């Protein structure tokens, strides 16, 4: 049986896996980092953010996890609610 590190090393040899990993690192991780940093700066838990958004903590966990997995892209409306719950404003930029 492979260890976790051995499995990752083996999977990264596959060009399709490596390309997806690099895409996530380039496109989605910066957004996740920004969201988690904003939540930490606000001093809020997922539960507190959920209450402010009018939803449940698992929904906030799924939102944050979606940015890691790339399985689901949150809507702009959801991101606006999340930002508002943190006392922030969502800005989308093309650069």
Image: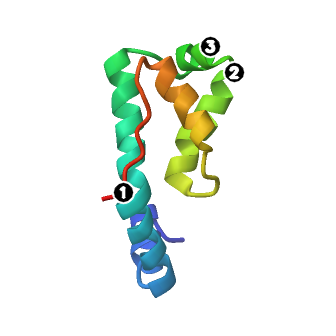
Residue beneath disc 1: 94
When asked about the image quadrant of residue 43, the answer is top left
Per the model, the C-alpha gap separating discs 3 and 1 is 31 Å
Mark 2 and mark 3: span between their CA atoms? 6 Å
Instruction: Estimate the x, y position of residue 46 in percent, counting from the top left.
Output: 54, 22
- The residue positioned 61% from the left and 19% from the top of the image is 53
- According to the image, label 2 marks what residue? 55
> Viewer-nearest of labels 3 and 1?
1
- Determine the residue positioned at 44% across, 55% down: 28
Can you identify the residue that label 3 sits on?
Answer: 51
**Crowd rating for badge 2 (residues with CA inside 10 Å; few <14, some 14–19, many 20+):** few
Tag of residue 82? none
* Element type where label 3 sits in the image: helix
**Image vertical order of residue 61 relative to residue 4, above or below:** above
- Whether pointer 2 and pointer 3 mark residues with C-beta atoms closer than 8 Å, the reply is no
Please state the horizontal and vertical placement of residue 33, each as a whole percent of the image. Answer: 36, 42
């Amino acid at each position: 049986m492979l260890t976790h590190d051995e499995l990752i090393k083996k999977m990264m040899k596959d060009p399709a896996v490596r390309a997806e990993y690099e895409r996530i690192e380039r496109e989605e991780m910066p957004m996740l980092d920004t969201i988690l940093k904003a939540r930490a700066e606000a001093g809020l838990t997922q539960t507190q953010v959920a209450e402010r958004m009018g939803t449940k903590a698992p929904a906030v966990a799924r939102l944050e996890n979606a940015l890691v997995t790339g399985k689901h892209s949150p809507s702009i409306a959801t991101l606006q609610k999340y930002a508002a719950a943190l006392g922030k404003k969502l800005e989308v930029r093309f650069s």
